[in-house]
Image (cartoon, rainbow, N blue to C red):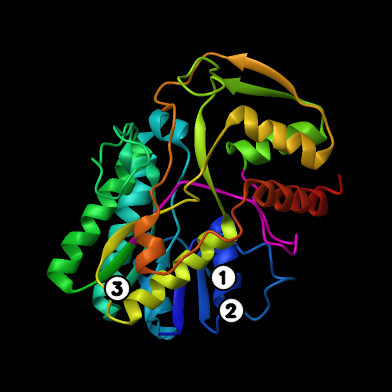
Amino acid sequence: MKNVLVCGGSGYIGSHTVKELLTCGYNPMLYDRKEPEFNGLIKNVKCVVGDLSDYALLEKTIRDGKIETVIHFAGYIEVGESVAHPERYYENNVCNTLNLLNCMVACNVKNIVFSSSAAVYGCPREIPIKEDALLNPINPYGETKYAIERMLGYFEKAYGIRYVALRYFNAAGADKSGLIGERHSPETHLIPIVLNALCKDKEIKVFGNDYNTKDGTCIRDYVHVTDLANAHILAVKHLASGGQSRAYNVGSGVGFSIKEIISIAEKVTNKKARISYEKRREGDPSVLLADITSITTELRWTPENSSIENIIQTAWDWLKTKDKV
């Protein structure tokens, strides 16, 4: 199953996955609202510019490309925005995924790898988090990911579409080439926020320093984007070999506090941070840490690039290449 439709393939994780798909001998086709920014790095990859709400274009793309597997990254991802505008998240994430699944049924495409999130767990009762933990999202973003996972289960029962849902923890870092990396507008992810602030001598806002952790700041699990991309390829192989549908956590299995991230970033950049402490944000758990036993044993995946030093170094190399800092 070499013909893979990558929905949202122009984005951060999507672009890294496209690169790894090519390296592994697949034929990826992008479907995204925008042209990719990495044409100079990844040549001869067809990109269809369109919205997942456009059923006719989506169906034509799947048929013309003889698509056998779908990797679905396309969706809104900002928690705060989802709280302020839940309708946007249900329409774009849930309704458009329903459109995609209907197209897959019509075109007899039976395999999909879905970009889910640790947000489906909400505030977990046990750390590290296992896949069989209670799913109790606390914001519309997490709710949409949960709704899609449930929808995938029903589509499998009705139409035989098998799936792997990858529940990301915190994707970070950049391709070792330094030519593709993480950039969002606005940027809401910690590591690029910290690196941008350091290189521009701006203040870093830390939301809460009174959590029940070793230094009072939240602890999170970070996974290198290249390792995450490889998890998608292993999921594609799993489905192609007849593997069962299921969800997997994808993280490093190791947690770092916000203060630790800032300290390591200071060492990598040789710059000193200016920090201001703000009140806690509603709904931020003290610790989120993945149990990655299932994906490492069943798919033979390893987070080999996910040392926190490598994550921050590659993110910094990307920023220097992009912004010439």
**What residue is shown with label 2?**
22
Give the residue displayed 20% in from the left and 60% down from the top: 153
Q: Is disc 3 placed on a helix, strand or loop?
A: helix
Residue 36: name its quadrant: bottom right
Residue 107: name its quadrant: bottom left
Residue 118 pos. (x, y %): 39, 44
Q: Can you say which quadrant of the picture contains the N terminus?
A: bottom left
Q: Which of marks 3 and 2 is nearer the N terminus?
A: 2
Residue 149: name its quadrant: bottom left
Q: Can you say which quadrant of the picture contains the C terminus?
A: top right
Give the residue displayed 50% in from the left and 37% down from the top: 220
**What residue is shown with label 1?**
18
- Residues shaded magenta: 165-184
Residue 298: say if magenta.
no
**What residue is shown with label 3?**
104
Q: What's the residue type where badge 1 is placed? A: Val
Residue 276 disc label: none
